[in-house]
Amino acid sequence: MIELLAIMFLGMVLGYFLRNHSKFIHVSNKLGIIIIYLLLFVLGISVGLNETIISKIDTIGLKALIITIGSLIGSLIFAYITYKLFFVPKHEK
């Protein structure tokens, strides 16, 4: 766990010092997207290889759909509240 936090902190420090280099920002954004796609692909392979998940995909799928819809609705509600509290200008009296 300490290693993960140290790596993240090192990335934050490096990002802080390189924040004004537009070429580095562009490359790191592209690289980040490629790595995320690769991680999702590998996750899909590991799920596909897991017999327990594949045999219960109908039950898991329904639960995942319910959790996804609940998360989406909750996120939208809290995003709206945050928008109203912090981003809508207050009227002067």
Image (tube, grey):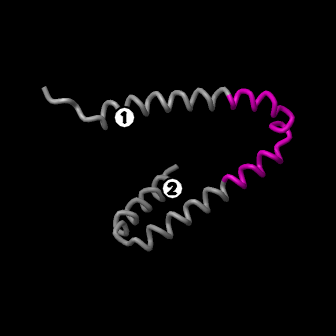
Kindly report the secondary structure that dominates the magenta region of the rendered protein: helix
| Residue drawn at (81%, 30%) of the image | 58
- 44 is within the stretch colored magenta: yes
Q: Position of residue 67 (x, y in %)?
A: 63, 28
Kind of residue at disc 1:
Tyr
Of circles 1 and 2, the one toward us is 1
Q: Quadrant of residue 82?
A: top left
Kind of residue at disc 2:
Glu
| Residue drawn at (80%, 37%) of the image | 53
Q: Which residues are magenta?
A: 40-65
SS at mark 1 in the image? helix
Tell me the number on the disc at residue 3: 2
- 13 is within the stretch colored magenta: no
| Residue drawn at (56%, 32%) of the image | 72
Between 68 and 1, which is closer to the camera in this rendering? 68
Tell me the number on the disc at residue 37: none
Determine which residue is flagged by label 1.
Answer: 83
**Which quarter of the rendered picture does the C terminus lie within?**
top left
Residue 3 located left or right of residue 41:
left
Residue 53 located left or right of residue 73:
right
